[in-house]
Image: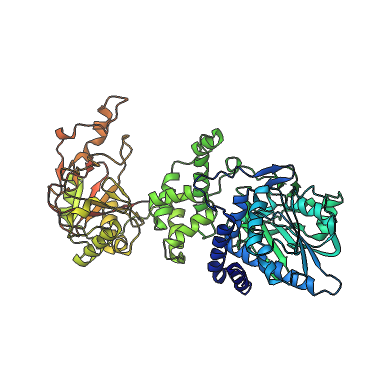
Amino acid sequence: MPHPVVALVSRLLDCANAGQAKPLVDQLVADLCTITGIDLHPEFFLDENASITARGKAVSPTTAAQCAEDVERTRVFMQGVYRALQQKCAQENVSPVRVLYAGTGPFALLLVPLLPLFNRDALRVTLLDIHAESLASLRRLLVVLQLDSSEIIEDIVCADACHWQAPQQYDVIISETMRQGLLQEPQVSIFAHLQQFLRVDGWLIPQRIRLDLWLTHAEEPQKKLQHLGNIFQLDKTSATQIGNGDSAILHGVLAVPQTPGRWQDLKLTTEICVFEDCVLRESQSQLTLPLYEKNAWIKPGSILRYGYEQGEYPRFVFAYEREADIDTLLLPDSLEKSALGVYHLRRFWHKAQLQKKLPSAVANERLAQLANNEWQLDRILLDKLGVGLEPAIAQVYHARNISEFERWIEFNHGGTLEPLIVECANRALLDCLENKKSLLDEHIEQPLSDAQLSHWDEHGYVIIPGVLSPQETAAARAAIWDYLQMREDDPESWYKPAGEMKKIMVQLFANPAFEVARQSPFIRAAFQQLWQRDDLVVTTDRVGFNPPETPQWQFPGPSIHWDVELQAPIPFGTQALIYLTDVAAHQGAFSCVPGFHKKIDHWLMAQPKGIDVQQQDWTQWPVKPIAASAGDLIIWHHALPHGSSPNRATFPRMVQYINMYAP
């Protein structure tokens, strides 16, 4: 009765894809490990039994056995080998078919489990491996499959396939001794040596290993691949050429296209044709995963040279002319549009890359020469695009290229950046560059009363009640609860936030509930009235969550401070927040020093030189907590010392930060 392995192999030969094959391959590998005594994943495995030969690495018996777990590799190779042997056996002039399998590993997986499916008079097989340990395991498998005393196994040889001298010619030579890109292992050298023992009408299996070189476009790395060309194909013809001492096929040159874009990475792909249409394509197997030479930045219009190095570590090496480093390139002009059609975005990206290269003297020098309004342009860009300043800065440093950064911007807008957003951003950026000012029309009805304006002038802050409805504040609170994975009715959850927080600042910027305030005509009108300008830019800011203090959790700040550069004269500017909960004076209320905006310039000039004026004993200052209701907007002059305060009530203080500024 046939061994269960034979039944598994028969079913595997009918599988059309890896999904169908996986349970069969898993069981086949488990059975082979049981038969041979191989521990496929020992606790401490350093691959110390590998052999480094003069022509590459011969992997250890354990590593060779692990290759069987690569499902698609196993399926496609076994189907290809089976089909090749069937066709060779069907040829009238070939009987028996002589097969050499070089680099068997402990399972000889690509051939031995198939042998019970053939007439024993049809094949004569030679099994060859460099490791005696692998052959010892393989002999156990041959016994179980009742092949050990059969004439089908003609010879078992322990030798290096790159040097072994065969006593005869073969109809089929099988060897899978490779990694992707023909890297590290001796597949090329084995075929180049063994081809001399192949009959004129014989076949090498795999029939063809094709390597291609590509360039990834910096703007669209996943969508726009530039095919440079096929750099090598290992087959019977090329193996014979190399074996005869002609290595010209292993070297060549390719022309790099001259394009407006930039070539970022070099990509090497591998495709393996085992036999006829039994093919492993890119990323279908460990053997066909692409290899990358990252951040090659190959110069457009140049020449790339390649060559295959044979030796202890076989590999393709590439020589090419690189583009100049970013710190030697000119900064893009702010009016140069990005792929999204936005001004200043390319320049913003370029500056971030310079910062990443610091401490580069050239980069430092370049950044020091920027105009005084450069930071203002950056703010306008990010706020007009509706992305928070902090996440945008993090993303521009994290992204591999500007295209990835632009896709992140689009993602924040549901996948598409609307033309109106681009138009508004460009208009604001252009106004800033041209120093244009759009003053408020004094005839337009303005929301702040004389009493509110008087309070603003005297105290430096103003409370504008009811800018958000109860339903709108509830929606904003719900967004914060959800992000932090807290429950309003579960106080214990208030101190275990799942979302990112910095002290009491919640790093949540994008949510439709927060856009209500940012797009509110009434709120905009209030800011315009204070600024006396109608071209203000609204910030995309975060939110705040300040829970009640407990013995285990104390208010972490920020306490009283300034967010403006403390150098007289302090220019006009605003800051603001909207209470999303009713906030009593002792409930972590926003606090400030009223009226200080009128005296700050004189106070700064009176301070001793060299001190940090942020460091004050605030208990000696007339700090006032500002109580207000949910939905109320508090705007303050940024010259006021201000901050949050400890929450000594029973419910969290929740706020949405918002502001507007002139371009």
Residue nearer the viewer, 575 or 60: 60
Check the image and report above or below for 180 versus 551. Answer: below
Q: Position of residue 176 (x, y in %)?
A: 69, 57
Determine the residue positioned at 62% across, 72% down.
Answer: 10
Q: Residue at x 51, y 60 (%)?
A: 340
Q: Is residue 282 left or right of residue 653?
A: right
Up/down of 372 relative to 143, above or below: above
Which residue is pictured at 50% across the width and 51% down the height?
399
Quadrant of the rendered structure where residue 610 is?
top left
Residue 201 or residue 10, whichever sits in front:
10
* Above or below, comparing residue 367 to residue 304 in the picture: above
Residue 228 % position (x, y) = 71, 57
Q: Position of residue 646 (x, y in %)?
A: 17, 44
Left or right: 127 as drawn, with respect to 420 = right
Work out which quarter of the rendered image holds the N terminus and state it. Answer: bottom right
Q: Is residue 442 visible?
A: no
Residue pictured at 67% horizontal, 45% vertical: 322
Q: Is residue 89 visible?
A: yes
Residue 575 % position (x, y): 27, 49
